[in-house]
Amino acid sequence: MISVCMATYNGETFLKKQIDSILSQLGNDDELIISDDGSIDKTISIINEINDQRIKLYHHSSAVPKNKKKFDLHTINHYISFNFLNALNKAKGDYIFFSDQDDIWYSYKIEKCIDVLNNCDMVLSNFSLINNTDQVIINKYLKKRRFINNYIIRSFSPGYSGCAMAFRKEMLKYILPFPKDMSCGHDNWAGICVAKFGKLSFIDEPLFQHRIHEKNNSGFCKKSPNNILQKINWRTSMFFNILMRKRKK
């Protein structure tokens, strides 16, 4: 069984394309779990109009403030991470995928990821970058050398992308619960946990199109607003959090 976990917030512009690209790859017993963080646009209406039994919509209890743009990256990551956590806690699948609300998955993404997951605990794939008109900006964004399977190195230089991530359900015992201060983001935390306790693989072939536009929260092609002290503090916190996480039988 496959569980795709998607976190939404005011995603009306691109949401349907992404949902359609995911549902076309899911079987009847699979699920697309959507956790919405208080959208005030047509996001909920779009999801309901699709009317597919594989979609399971949940509402996150802590809605994102309307003035979210005024928050620093740490606070935004915190809200996004716990919105994903709400979806992740509902997942029942043997294989779990994270999904952004505005990307487009290629028709073979799930199949190729699961084929690799037969021999590892987590897989990350390459992807293309597109703009708000679906025009390809960069055909292959990631470089394989970025994925060093060492949790100490990754704690201080994480660089994991949740939208490119899929993992076996057995990894949840290490990933959950999230640290209370999720400064690193759900994706970096999950990746570092697997780097410590499991085996990670990388697919160099782009398996989806990641959208860059003025309203999304992606860090791609954007300069971080955080100063050096913030970066050091958050990475140090992440390192000590992962040190406290013990191997479980």
Image: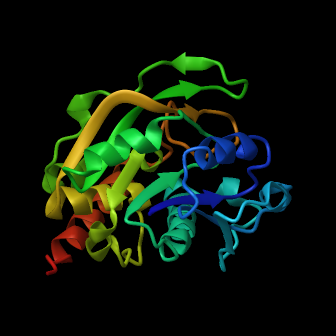
Q: Is residue 192 left or right of residue 39?
A: left
Foreground residue among 234 and 220: 220
Q: Is residue 41 left or right of residue 100?
A: right
Rendered image quadrant of residue 36: bottom right
- The quadrant of the rendering that contains the N terminus is bottom left
Q: Is residue 230 visible?
A: yes
Q: Is residue 56 left or right of residue 127?
A: right
Foreground residue among 238 and 113: 113
Q: Position of residue 175 (x, y in %)?
A: 32, 70
- The quadrant of the rendering that contains the C terminus is bottom left
At a point 43% along the width and 67% down the height, the residue shown is: 93
Q: Position of residue 83 (x, y in %)?
A: 57, 68
In the image, is residue 246 above or below residue 212? below
In the image, is residue 148 above or below residue 198? above
At a point 67% along the width and 56% down the height, the residue shown is: 70
Q: Position of residue 164 (x, y in %)?
A: 42, 43
The coloring applied to the image is rainbow
At a point 16% along the width and 47% down the height, the residue shown is: 149
Q: Is residue 69 left or right of residue 92?
A: right
Q: Position of residue 69 (x, y in %)?
A: 68, 53
